Amino acid sequence: MKENILELIKKQKLEEDCVILAHHYQMPEIKQVADYIGDSYYLSALISKLKTPKIYFCGVRFMAETAKILSPDKTVILANPDAGCPMADMVSLDDLIEFKENNPNHLIVSYVNTSADIKAQSDICVTSSVALNIMNTVKDKEILFLPDRNLGRYIKEKTKNENVTLWEGFCPIHERAELEDMNALKSKQPDAVVLIHPECKWELVEQADFVGSTTEIMDFVSKSDKSKFIIGTELGVLESLQKQHPEKEFFLLYDEFVCKNMKKTTAQDLLNAMQGKGGEAIKLDEDVMVKASKSLYEMIKRSSK
């Protein structure tokens, strides 16, 4: 039955001028039919270069909003409208506006895992793959980094910038992993290289062999001559690595490294969206899009230097 759905998606794709974008954390069935698969930065940088008028986004809401902001002339459809991001919801617009009023000299740096409204109130956006490079360009500023305190702590430590205020947000999935989990797995697999996403707690990041975004973790594995890896991020990355490197062994650091929101999108959801029976066309206020695009293009400009 699932194979029939995938074939119908491929057939539907041939009938309309569109692309399917998917994040690494998506279900394997989605990645089978996606035109492009990547992390947040890769997809953000790609979007404005696409020539097709319609984008089907298999990810969470803030990603589809980002696609719309960077390509306002395109139709952007979120395949599953219920796919949200709990971390993005940890910043309220009112609280951010209040902070800005009380701290007018602070540069607002927001993780791309935020709503369009928050991006519109930000000076620069970052993704985990470009955050360090960008934050090194603003070391002389007082900064509010939001919403992820774990990524923020990592950046603060690496850039040695004490003028960074951290918002108290976090990824509920990455936050679950404890140092005990890593040590227990490491004792069973002493030869394995530990690869950790910076959304994890600092005590894990500090003990990792390598810290990086999903794409950086995947690139590390591709270039490494090692054969065993402990993967400290979402299950979807491990699944992609197993497919790309069947000769290597991968171990998920924590059994519950599964983002239920990312996994909400099924092949049936995507097909329904493509047939006009589901999905949601992203609509954003024009003023919000204009303001939010400035922080996103600032990210792309600074990260390409």
Image (spheres, rainbow, N blue to C red):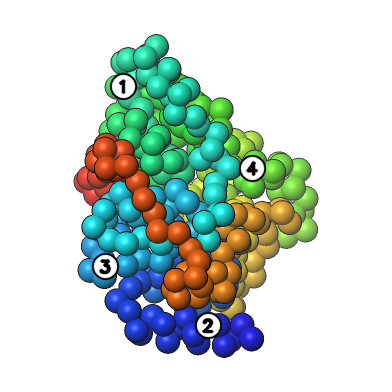
Looking at marks 2 and 1 on the same chain, the residue that comes earlier in the sequence is marked by 2
- The image shows residue 271, relative to residue 185, as above or below, that is below
- How would you rate the neighbour count of disc 1 (Cα within 10 Å): few for under 14, some for 14-19, many for 20 or more? some
Looking at marks 2 and 3 on the same chain, the residue that comes earlier in the sequence is marked by 2
- Pointer 1 residue: 141
Looking at marks 1 and 3 on the same chain, the residue that comes earlier in the sequence is marked by 3
Residue depicted at 43% across the width and 52% down the height: 63
Quarter where residue 285 is shown: top left
Q: What amino acid is found at the position of numbered circle 1 in the picture?
A: Lys
- Pointer 2 residue: 6
- How would you rate the neighbour count of disc 4 (Cα within 10 Å): few for under 14, some for 14-19, many for 20 or more? some
As measured in the structure, the alpha-carbon distance from the residue carrying label 1 to the one carrying label 3 is 39 Å
- The image shows residue 85, relative to residue 1, as above or below, that is above
Is 170 or 273 nearer to us in this picture?
273
| Viewport quadrant of the N terminus | bottom right
- Pointer 3 residue: 53
Look at the numbered discs 2 and 3 and tell me whether their residues touch, using CB distance below 8 Å: no
Residue depicted at 58% across the width and 42% down the height: 86
- The image shows residue 251, relative to residue 93, as above or below, that is below
Q: Position of residue 223 (x, y in %)?
A: 45, 66
Q: What amino acid is found at the position of numbered circle 3 in the picture?
A: Pro
Can residue 222 be seen here? The reply is: no
